[in-house]
Amino acid sequence: MRYSNTHKKQTEQNITNAALDEFRSNGYHGVGIDGIAKSAGVTSGAFYTHFGSKSDAFLRAIEVGLKQVSNELDRRRTEDTGEWLSEFLDWYLTPPDAADAMSKATLQAFPIQGGCALTSLAPEVCRSGTQAKHVFEKELMTTIALIKDGLDEGGNKEAWSILSSLIGAITLARSVKNNDTAVEILSSVLSTTLDLLKETEPA
């Protein structure tokens, strides 16, 4: 049976999304090709039609996962509210309201729920080879350029400080049991990063 190009592209996207979810949740060594294929709703044979190995799927997952962050930054910049970067920081470091009715997919998009590949995939990339680190760094630099673009004054130093604070805050907040402690971590870092933004404003 011959499939259309549209079907093939959709299947590849489904496998990529499944691989990203599995790597974020279970780590590179916590899932195999069969697990990724099952999550994507395809056979292991179909997986190999689109990716030569699990490592190939990991590289694609890194690229797609980090682009989700840069795309969100770029979307807010394009809307140009004048406060787009501070609004992004607020969104990134604010847990979803438990009182709001949200689908599982929507909840999982929040960084604190594990939706940020910068925090969830970085430990896996650290233990990977140069190819994975190259892909990660390439997409990371795109994110840094976008943050830098949102600063009135300031450069890479301030952009790296902001991004590192975001990643550290999410990592710590997701690692503690007490919700009040997690909220304190997130709110403290949000306040500090917003202060840093103000420091880059023209006098």
Image (spheres, rainbow, N blue to C red):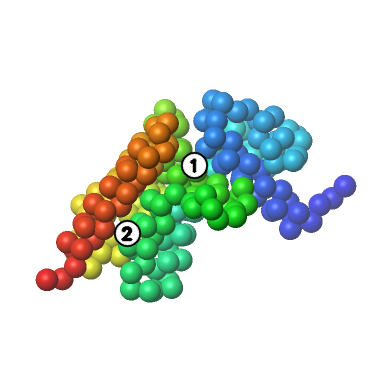
For the residue pair 90 and 24, the one nearer the viewer reads as 90
Q: Which residue is mark 2?
A: 147
Q: Which residue is mark 1?
A: 114
Please identify the quarter of the rendering in which residue 6 is found: bottom right
Location of residue 80 in the rendering, given as x and y in whole percent from the top left corner: 39, 74
SS state under label 1: loop
Compared across the picture, whether 86 is left or right of 105 comes to left
Say which amino acid is labelled 2.
Ile
Residue ranking furthest to the top: 29
Residue at 37 percent of width and 63 percent of height: 87
Location of residue 41 in the rendering, given as x and y in whole percent from the top left corner: 74, 40
SS state under label 2: helix
Using the rendered image of the protein, determine whether residue 65 is visible from the camera's viewpoint: no
Q: Which mark is residue 160?
A: none
Q: Please say if 23 is above or below 96.
A: above
Residue at 61 percent of width and 47 percent of height: 104
Compared across the picture, whether 50 is left or right of 150 comes to right
Compared across the picture, whether 12 is left or right of 76 comes to right
Residue ranking furthest to the right: 1
Using the rendered image of the protein, determine whether residue 128 is visible from the camera's viewpoint: yes
Residue at 44 percent of width and 49 percent of height: 95
Compared across the picture, whether 9 is left or right of 101 comes to right
Check the picture and name the quadrant holding the C terminus: bottom left
Say which amino acid is labelled 1.
Gly
Location of residue 184 in the rendering, given as x and y in whole percent from the top left corner: 32, 43
Instruction: Report if the CB atoms under discs 1 and 2 are less than 8 Å apart.
Output: no
Q: Please say if 75 is above or below 162.
A: below
How many numbered callouts?
2
What is the crowding at mark 2: few (fewer than 14 residues within 10 Å), some, or many (at least 20)? many
For the residue pair 102 and 113, the one nearer the viewer reads as 102
Residue at 84 percent of width and 50 percent of height: 2
